[in-house]
Structure formats: C-alpha cells, structure tokens
Amino acid sequence: MNFKSYAAVIFLFFSIHSMSQNMQQGFTYLETGKYEAAEIYFKTVLNDHPKNKTAKLCYGRAVGLNGNPKKALSIFSDLLKAYPNNFEIKLNYAESLLWDKSYGKAKTYYEMLIGENGQSFPTLLGYANTLSNLKIYDDALLYVNKALEVSPNNKNALTSKKYIYLGYAYQNQQQQNYTEAEKLLKENLILFENEKETLINLANLYLIMEAYDKAESTYKVIGRDKANKAISLNGLALVSHLNHKNKTALKFSKEAYDTIPHLKDSSIVKQTQERYIQALIWNKKYKLAQVLIGKLTENTSNSNWVLVLRATLNIYKSDFKKSLVDYNNILKNDSASFDGNLGKANALKALGQYEEAYQSANNTLRFYKKQKDASQFIKSLNTHFTPLLETKGAYSFDNGDNEAYTFNTNLEFPTSTKFKWLANYEYRTTSNSITDNKATSNNMLLGLAYQLLPNITFKGTTGISSAKANTQDYTQLLTDVSFHIKPFKLQILDVGYKREIQNFNADLLNREIVMNHFYANYNVSTNFNLGWFTQYYYTSQNDNNTRNLLFTSLYYNILKKPALKAGFNYQYITFKNQLPNIYFSPERFHATEIFINLIKDETIARPKEWFYELTAATGYQFIENNNKQSTYRAQGKLGYKFSERALLNIYGTRSNIASTTAAGFTFTEIGMRFKWYVFDKPVFMKL
C-alpha cells in the first residue's frame, strides 16, 4: 500500500499546535507532502533545539515519508525510550513500521494500541491498513468501518476503504472467485459512484471472465467522463479484439490514438500508443506497426513495453527466434515480467522447445499464482503430451455396388516431450452385391515418434496386414516412415515412405496389390492470408505398375474465427500401365476445382460446445482425351466437446471425382469418431 498516495496520514500533533508557531512552515511542508523540505526544515530546528520533542517527532515523520523508513524507526524508538507513555509517539512508531513494510510487527503493535484505546481513530485506521497490506481483507474492512464510526465520512478512511475493496476483489479474482470479486467491486461503486479505478478493475475482471458484453458496458461508463475517453476507447478496442472484431478494434484504437496530443497523463499516452500498435498487428498491418515501434525504440531505448510490442509483432509474423531475443531482453530488465515469461513460453512452444516452454510458463505462475493465461497455456501444452485414444467407425458405398465397414482405433502414448509410442488397429470388411465378392482385412501397426531437433520429428510405424478374400488369405508387411520438418518460418515439409495394401474394395483386396509410396507434402503460409499446399506421390506396385500423383492447392484465409477459406485445387495422375478392367489407371488424368471451407476447430471449442466443418467444391476432371466431366465434393462434420478430455463427432462425405476404381463414379461415406485423452495430464508428470 502506497501510504504517500492514499493511506491515512496521521497528523495528530496535539502538542505541536499548542507550542510555538515558529514551526508552522514545517507543519505546512508535512501537510502538503513536501517531505524533503520538511526534513531539511526540522533538521535545522533540531540543530538549535536538539531536545525539542515536537521537532524531533516531525523530523521522524519527514524522514520516513521521504523514503528512509529505517531511520524514522530509529528516531521514534529513541523518542519512545524518552517518553514511553506518549500515545502520539506510539502512533507514529506504528506508522513507521508500515513505511518499513514490517507488517507483521505493525499488526502486533497496533493490537497493543487498540488494547490501550479502542476508540482511537488513527489506531483503528492504521490497523485496518496493516491488515490490508497483509491481505487479511475481511478484518481490514471490519476495522476501517470502526474507524468510520469514530470519524464519519473521514476522507482518509474512505480512501483506505476503497483500496481495501480493490485489494479484496483482486485477491478473489486471483483465486478465480469471480462472482465474489464482482460483488466487492460493485459495493465499492455504491460508495464511490463511477469511480475510475474501480470501474477499470471491474472491466478487467469481466475480460478475465470472458463476459465481454459487460466489459464493453463498463468501458462505456468510464467514457462518460471526457477526461477518461482514451481509457474507454482503449478498453473497447481490446473487447472488440476478443470478440474477433479486429477492424472495429482498430477503429476504436485509432480514435484514441488521435487524442494523444491532448493527453496529459504519460501512462495513458503509453497505453494508447500500445493499444494502437496492437490493433495494427491484429489487423496484419505489420509495416505501419514496425514503423511506429521503430520510432518508440528510438525514444525509449530498451523499455520493456516497447520490447513486448516488437516481440508480439514477430510472433504474429512467425519470426519466433526474433521474438525470443526480445523476451530474453525483457527478462534481463525484469525477471518477474509477466509478458516476458509467458511470451517467452509461447515463442519456445512455437519453436518446438517444449521443456523450456514449460519452464517459462511455470516461472510465470511462480510470480503470478493461478494466473489464468499461464494456467491455460500449461493445460494446452499438457494436452499435446497426454495419452490419446481415438476410435472411428465408418460405412461407405459407391455406385459400383461396393460397400465397406471400417473400424479404426489409434493410440498415442507420449513418455516425454520428445518421445511417444504409437499404435494403430484397423478392421475393414468390404463386399460387392453384384460379384458377390467379400473380403476382410486386419491391419496392426506399432511405432514411435521422436523429436530429433526442435524443427525435425521422426515418425515410424510398422506392422502387418492380414487379409481374407474369396480366393486367398495372406499376410503382408506394412510400414510408414516419415520426417516432419519446419525448414523455414511459415513452411512445413513432410517426406516419407509408406507400404500398404490396396483394400478399397473386395476385388482389389483379393488381388493382393502392394503399394510402395514415396511421398512429400509441402505447405507454405504467408502473413497476408495466402497459403499453398503441394503433395507428390510416386507409387510402385507389385503388379509392375507405377503411379505419379501431383496435387496442389492455392487458398486464401478469409476469416480467422470461425475459420473460412477458399481456394483452387489441381490434381494430376498418370499410370505406367493402363488396367481399366482392374482399377482406374489412366495414362493422363487432370482435375481442377474451386472450394470453400468453413470450420470451427475442435481444438478451440470449449467444453460443452459444438464444433463443425463444412467443405464444398466443384470443378472438372479430364480423363485421357475424353470430354471434361463436372465434379463435386461435399464434406461435413458436426461434433460436441463433452469436456477437455472427450469429444464425439459424426461426419460424412460425398464425391464423384474418379478414384482408383473407375471413372463415372460416386462415393459416399458416413461415420462417427470418438476422441479421448486417457489421463488428465502427461504420464511423465505422474511418475
């Protein structure tokens, strides 16, 4: 508690005013907060009158309030030795304990004073302030109310009560007792109607509660006072951002930014500059944000708030290494910086340095216990390394009278941030009502994934496929080996080899066609919403046929939440040998389509919320030298997230794009999927 600004300053100089008025100038210095002048003044008096009790008492107050509490304690201790029964000196000694932040000693001493005089206003108020500093807010409220009974409407007591309410509300907020925190802040507003600090705290509470409508209303109340217009606009900009209305956020922040020439409070100027640059970043106006940050850097050197802005800009631009440098510099300046610690955790996570990310997030919680964002970050990171079981059942059919039932279960079991075991089982039964062919296959795969470097992960599985068909039963080796690589920012490359059995329908499964795929996937994102994905497969089969497949997709991200993107796809396929009576194997196949995709991803859905995905595409396919054929593709998914650990969704797809079976083909699949995190956190945290 800052006693110079709002704590009760105890001016009980009963003896002072009964003595010589020659010291009136010094009293005025004390009462008007000119402590340095008061210290010099009373020191001069004591040079001439070293035994003057009043001058010595005032000198002690001036020294303590001027930032030297230990010296003040020594002065009042000496006075107590000389005047052990002087209650006024005892009060000043008690207050000096508060200046020295010796709150435990102050509590004990004030309790003794209350025993001597339970109706002393400065004793009751000093004790209330002591309890407030010890965060014993319920008793602090009790005693500040007792002080107000002794001196109704006392300005110092009311100020202390306001800050006790604010501290008590903040304590409940940290403990996530949001309803109680809201109640306390509203009680404060009854005492102090539309009080700015209380309204700001209430708006911040609503932001944490994600009660954005209430936060917006509160910021509007703040803005009714024209002096607080910039604060209001800055808050409204943040609320708009959290409501995924970034254009509106930029409008509010620009309006606030234009008021800077008229702002007198440097802290509000800083807040307004900060919010405007953040709004530019949210709207991907990176060049202007970079220019403004550069100007601030020239004027403020290595101020942490400017470094945070630059680090945030680089996070949005996916320059995570650059942002990490800034976060490290922030922590050099202030090891307890919230933005520095949690920002560093996010940058480390993006760089694949997960153990260090855990360390930075836990360091955030060491300084800010139960902080919501840091706790959520750790929970999200835990999910990434928690054993996962996923099962899927599907029914599919096509216009060639093929039917199939598929059951698939997949297990991921991480044992560290770098290593996880993998297991997969798939059962598939397929039949054709015309040929009366039936076949089943059981595939079992075991393997592992290991992070070789922060940007390179190896994944390998191997197993067997056991098939039973009309004319034969057989077992074949399966394998899938790949490297997941992030070569540069905004780029992902997958390269690998996969061996599998063609099991689309019963006839193909009966032929025991082994496919050896050599593949590469390459995805490039940009900072201006454009993306490009390319896939290439070279397949060698045991029937002496080979296939080349090229697929490329150029897409644009229209919206972020819910995600909406549209684009253009192109596919090219060629087979060495044409075997049309067995499977679709043209010498030349081209397909083009435009698509749109709307998705609310399951990872951002909260417990007890729905998630969904819808894709629609249409285009043309060109087979050999035949005339073009129109194509369509529709895919949908609807799911419900029961908890942080479990979700269920149904899905369906329908397409008439040619496949490995034949042209002039339509295919439909419907299914259900269940995803379950087996434990509530990673197993290596339980060991």
Image (cartoon, rainbow, N blue to C red):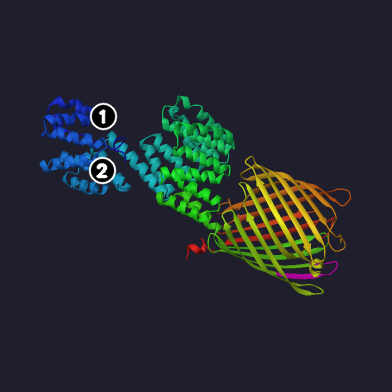
User: Residue 327's spot in the image, x, y percent?
Assistant: 48, 44
> What's the mark number on residue 179?
none
Q: What is the C-alpha distance between the residues marked 2 and 1?
A: 20 Å
Counting the numbered discs, the total is 2
Does residue 370 show up?
no
Mark 1 crowd level (few <14, some 14–19, many ≥20, 10 Å Cα): some
> What's the mark number on residue 100?
2
- Quarter of the picture containing the N terminus is top left
| Bounds of the magenta segment | 431-442
| Disc 1, SS | loop
Relative to 187, say whether 665 is above or below. Answer: below
Residue type, label 2: Asp
Does residue 583 show up?
yes
Mark 2 crowd level (few <14, some 14–19, many ≥20, 10 Å Cα): some
Q: Quadrant of residue 507?
A: bottom right
Give the mark nearer the N terminus: 2 vs 1. Answer: 1
Q: Which residue is mark 1?
A: 34
| Disc 2, SS | loop
Relative to 291, say whether 411 is above or below. Answer: below
Is residue 330 toward the left or the right of residue 380 in the image? left
Q: At x 57% / y 32%, what residue is drawn?
A: 288
